[in-house]
């Protein structure tokens, strides 16, 4: 636990950015306060920030590309680890994209695969067959359906495709 220097609230360490120069290795301001300060600075100095970026565009681009190039393996490993631990985030992302393509504001209520299995079982909701990690929306996205535990059921691919034809 650490107390934020700006807001004075005691928060867990994962609420602070890491900072090598700090005596405890963390920024003295929490992430929320640091973001707020950064945003205020950018808004107050918008023209100066834009001018600096234009003057140093290539140098900044090379700097950031070099940082990624040096850490590519560790970044890819972290991304893969996060994706494996949070498969529901891929569902949510795919839903948001499809809802926007259909012209709807996406309504997303987060849930996990385990919650879906606990509610409906680990088989296709329609035929009882093997669930192939596809999900069916009883109220389709094109009709304003939301991505929530109440509007998603496990479905095998043939049943899911059949339901597409029925709701089209």
Image (tube, helix red, strand yellow):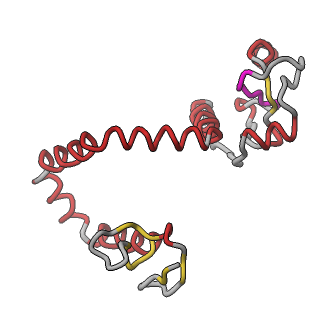
Task: In the rendered view, tell whether residue 120 sits above or below residue 64.
Answer: above
Specify the quadrant of the image occupied by residue 160.
top right
x, y (%) of residue 88? 65, 40
| Horizontal side, residue 119 vs residue 80: left or right | right
Placement of the C terminus among the 4 image quadrants: top right
Nearer to us in this view, 9 or 19: 19
Toward the viewer: 136 or 105? 136
Judging depth in this view, the residue of 77 and 38 nearest the camera is 77
Q: Is residue 2 left or right of residue 35?
A: right
Of all residues shown, which one is farthest toward the left? 55
Q: Specify the quadrant of the image occupied by residue 158.
A: top right
> Residue shown at 57%/30% (left/top)?
101
Count the marks: how many?
0
- Tell me which segment is drawn in magenta: 132-138
Does 161 appear above or below 68?
A: above
Q: How far from the left and from the top, in percent, is residue 154? A: 80, 28
Q: Residue at x 40, y 38 (%)?
A: 76
Identify the residue shown where x is 15% and y is 59%. Answer: 51
Expressed as whole percent of the image width and height from the top left, the position of residue 69 reads 25, 39
Asked if residue 109 lies in the magenta stretch, the reply is no
Residue 59 shown left or right of residue 166 in the figure: left
Q: Is residue 55 above or below residue 144?
A: below
Give residue 149's quadrant in the image: top right
């Amino acid at each position: 636990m650490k107390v934020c220097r700006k807001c004075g609230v005691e928060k867990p360490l994962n609420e602070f950015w890491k900072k090598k120069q700090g005596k405890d290795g963390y920024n003295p301001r929490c992430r929320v306060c640091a973001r707020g300060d950064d945003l205020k600075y950018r808004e107050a100095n918008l023209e100066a920030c834009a001018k600096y970026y234009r003057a140093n565009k290539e140098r900044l681009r090379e700097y950031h590309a070099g940082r990624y190039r040096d850490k590519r393996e560790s970044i890819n490993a972290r991304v893969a680890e996060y994706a494996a631990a949070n498969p529901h985030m891929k569902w949510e992302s795919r839903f948001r994209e499809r809802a926007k393509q259909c012209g709807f504001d996406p309504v997303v209520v987060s849930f996990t695969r385990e919650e879906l299995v606990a509610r409906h079982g680990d088989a296709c909701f329609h035929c009882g067959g093997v669930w192939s990690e596809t999900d069916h929306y009883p109220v389709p996205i094109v009709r304003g359906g939301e991505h929530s535990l109440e509007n998603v059921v496990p479905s095998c691919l043939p049943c899911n495709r059949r339901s597409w034809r029925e709701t089209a």
